[in-house]
């Protein structure tokens, strides 16, 4: 992973950088416990809007993978975790959150900058009872939330006078 980060920081080829940023975003969404916005600080010569687009597309595709993975293990995890009253309470609360707030709740959570979004994505996919959340809207929510996160970071850093891209 360190090699990829070094490469992203040093590459001057915008196409190669965009492809690697896209793949990094998928990996960060599916499995890496790091905020995907860390990639905004690599390669300051790359346009921030192209970075935002690559991050958002990677997060959208990665989120569909998470929805599929979480849906496949949801019932198994639930049956294994329902061992005591506390775990039942936590599981029922998570189910309620997903049912009550579904796409809107996911959008708000995923719009928080610098937050690791792997955990909320898996929670929403594991406790997605009866397919309440569908892949296409799930991907759209992730795409828009990623754009939000980049814009928020861009605005805050602009206010602070810190350059994150060309």
Image: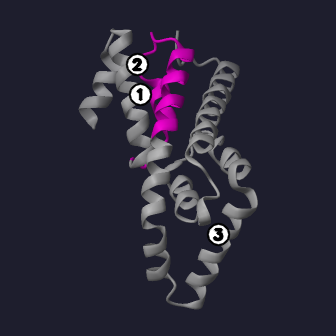
Q: Main secondary structure of the magenta part?
A: helix
Residues at discs 3 and 2 in contact (Cβ within 8 Å): no
Residues at discs 1 and 2 in contact (Cβ within 8 Å): yes
The answer to which of 66 and 10 lies nearer the viewer is 66
Left or right relative to 164: residue 27? left
User: Residue 95 appears at what percent x and percent y?
Assistant: 64, 69
> Mark 3 highlights which residue?
95
Label placed on residue 18:
2
Give the residue furthest to the left: 3
- Residue depth check, mark 3 versus mark 2: number of the one nearer the observer: 3
Give the residue furthest to the front: 130
Cα distance between the residues tagged 1 and 2:
6 Å
Residues at discs 1 and 3 in contact (Cβ within 8 Å): no
> Mark 1 highlights which residue?
22
Identify the magenta region.
32-61
Q: Residue at x 57, y 16 (%)?
A: 49
């Amino acid at each position: 992973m360190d090699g990829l980060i070094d490469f992203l920081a040093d590459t001057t080829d915008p196409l190669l950088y965009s492809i690697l940023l896209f793949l990094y975003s998928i990996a960060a969404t599916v499995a890496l416990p790091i905020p995907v916005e860390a990639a905004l600080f690599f390669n300051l010569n790359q346009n921030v809007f192209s970075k935002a687009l690559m991050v958002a597309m990677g997060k959208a595709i990665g989120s569909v993978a998470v929805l599929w993975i979480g849906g496949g293990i949801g019932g198994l995890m639930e049956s294994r975790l329902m061992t005591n009253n506390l775990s039942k309470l936590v599981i029922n609360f998570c189910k309620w959150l997903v049912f009550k707030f579904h796409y809107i709740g996911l959008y708000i959570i995923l719009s928080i900058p610098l937050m690791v979004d792997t955990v909320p994505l898996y929670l929403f996919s594991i406790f997605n009872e009866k397919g309440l959340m569908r892949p296409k809207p799930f991907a759209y929510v992730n795409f828009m939330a990623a754009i939000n996160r980049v814009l928020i970071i861009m605005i805050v850093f602009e206010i602070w006078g810190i350059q994150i891209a060309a």
